[in-house]
Image (tube, helix red, strand yellow):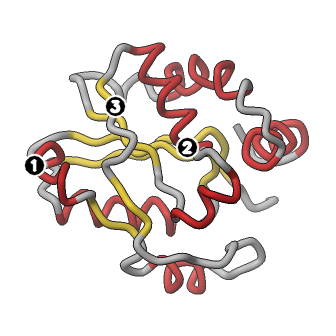
Amino acid sequence: MVYKDKARRFVLSLKHGDRTDLARAAGPWLARAGRDLLADAPLIVPVPLHRFRLIRRTYNQAALLATQLAGVTGTDIMVDALHRTKATAPLEGHSKDQRFAALDAAISVNPALRAQIKGRRIVLVDDVMTSGATFAAATEACFAAGADDVCVLALARVVKDA
């Protein structure tokens, strides 16, 4: 979805409005959009929240989306494969360069699960893709752990008005 109007309200309701039930509707949408990415049994991995943000929010919306996607497709999922090692301030209003700088080395692979990432094709899942900085940090962590390939799948994408 393009992250504006109704799609933006939908995502914000899921993310900040405790409307966790909305993830159920999004599972089939993500499965259709990511059909090609989900071929050949990849490992689905949600983008992590830092533990402080997770405590405040009580759930990770990316994990909810990834779980629904895995349920719809029967694909393997590992919700705790990645960790946010660095708490970052909310990035809304930041430039692309500021976002990439803030997320530098902010995500790592869970050391206990490193062997399960090695040699796998990973599909990272998140709710919104803005600059790509979060996906880039998560991708780097997966490659550092030996992933063969990493693809990304977001429920919504911020686009610039033409």
Q: Which mark is residue 115?
A: 1
User: In terms of depth relative to the viewer, which is nearer, 37 or 113?
Assistant: 113
Which quadrant holds residue 110? bottom left
Horizontally, residue 79 falls left or right of residue 129, namely left
The residue wearing badge 2 is 62
The residue wearing badge 3 is 77
Q: Position of residue 32 (x, y in %)?
A: 52, 19
Which corner quadrant holds the C terminus? bottom right
Earlier residue among tags 3 and 2: 2
User: In terms of depth relative to the viewer, which is nearer, 122 or 37?
Assistant: 122
Under mark 3, the amino acid is: Ile
Earlier residue among tags 1 and 3: 3
* CA separation in Å, label 1 and label 3: 15 Å
Q: How many marks?
A: 3
Question: Which residue does the image show at 62% across and 63% down from the upper left?
Answer: 53
User: In terms of depth relative to the viewer, which is nearer, 95 or 54?
Assistant: 54
Q: Position of residue 92 (x, y in %)?
A: 74, 71
